[in-house]
Image (cartoon, rainbow, N blue to C red):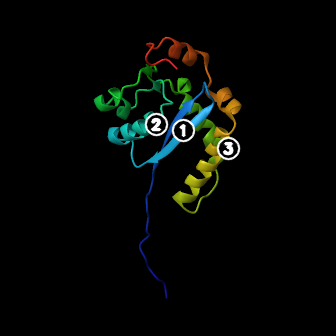
Amino acid sequence: MKVRQPPQLTYAWRYLFLVVDGRAGTLHWCWIASLAADEVLAAVGGLQQTGELAALVWDGAPSHRDASVQAVGLPLIGLPPYSPELNPAERVFQELRRAIDGQVYATLDEKAAAVETELATWDADPARVRSLAGWDWIDEAVVRLPADHAA
């Protein structure tokens, strides 16, 4: 007897919101449900409360262009269009993919746990983070910030 059953496909995802401080060599991250402006704004607001953010190196992603995110109260160091190689977070994502991709994870939670473990390892090694994303042009841009925002 042949049993016929329709396949069951499930799609689940979450987004890693990552802030890279290449000057201090630290990482800050959280998981968000979407890349909608309100989610991004809430994540930035949470980090802003720590007092560790002097500015944001911001690319042109749609949620980054939203007026509410633009009004977050931090200076924005903009990136030229189509230049992910200049974004510190993209450099960390590149290395993260090398460590995480190519493995099969039974669940999304299992993959998220692997990501968390890798990020925690890097966050404990400031020299490694600085080597990935501690770029002179960011230091120079932060120095040029208004006095009330400079780190």
Q: Quadrant of residue 11?
A: bottom left
Callout 1 secondary element? strand
Seen from the viewer's position, the closer of residues 36 and 12 is 36
| Identity, as a three-letter code, of the amino acid under mark 1 | His
Q: Residue at x 44, y 70 (%)?
A: 7
Seen from the viewer's position, the closer of residues 25 and 11 is 25
Report, in whole angstroms, how far the alpha carbon at label 3 lies from the one at label 2: 20 Å
Callout 3 secondary element? helix
Q: Give whichever of discs 1 and 3 has the lower sequence position.
A: 1
**10 Å crowding of disc 3: few (<14), some (14-19), many (20+):** few
Residue that protrudes farthest toward the bottom in the picture: 1
Give me the disc on residue 121: 3
Q: Is the residue 132 above or below the residue 6 in the image?
A: above
| Identity, as a three-letter code, of the amino acid under mark 3 | Thr
Indicate the position of residue 81 as horizontal and vertical percent values. Answer: 43, 22
Q: Give whichever of discs 1 and 2 has the lower sequence position.
A: 1
Q: Is the residue 140 above or below the residue 128 in the image?
A: above
Q: Are discs 1 and 2 less than 8 Å apart at CB?
A: yes
Indicate the position of residue 43 as horizontal and vertical percent values. Answer: 42, 40
Q: Is residue 70 left or right of residue 52?
A: left
Q: Is the residue 103 above or below the residue 43 in the image?
A: below
Callout 2 secondary element? helix
Return the residue at label 1.
Answer: 28
Q: Residue at x 44, y 79 (%)?
A: 4
Residue that protrudes farthest toward the left in the picture: 67
**10 Å crowding of disc 1: few (<14), some (14-19), many (20+):** some
| Identity, as a three-letter code, of the amino acid under mark 2 | Leu
Q: Residue at x 46, y 37 (%)?
A: 47
Q: Quadrant of residue 45?
A: top left
Report, in whole angstroms, how far the alpha carbon at label 1 lies from the one at label 3: 12 Å
Q: Residue at x 67, y 40 (%)?
A: 124
Give me the disc on residue 47: 2
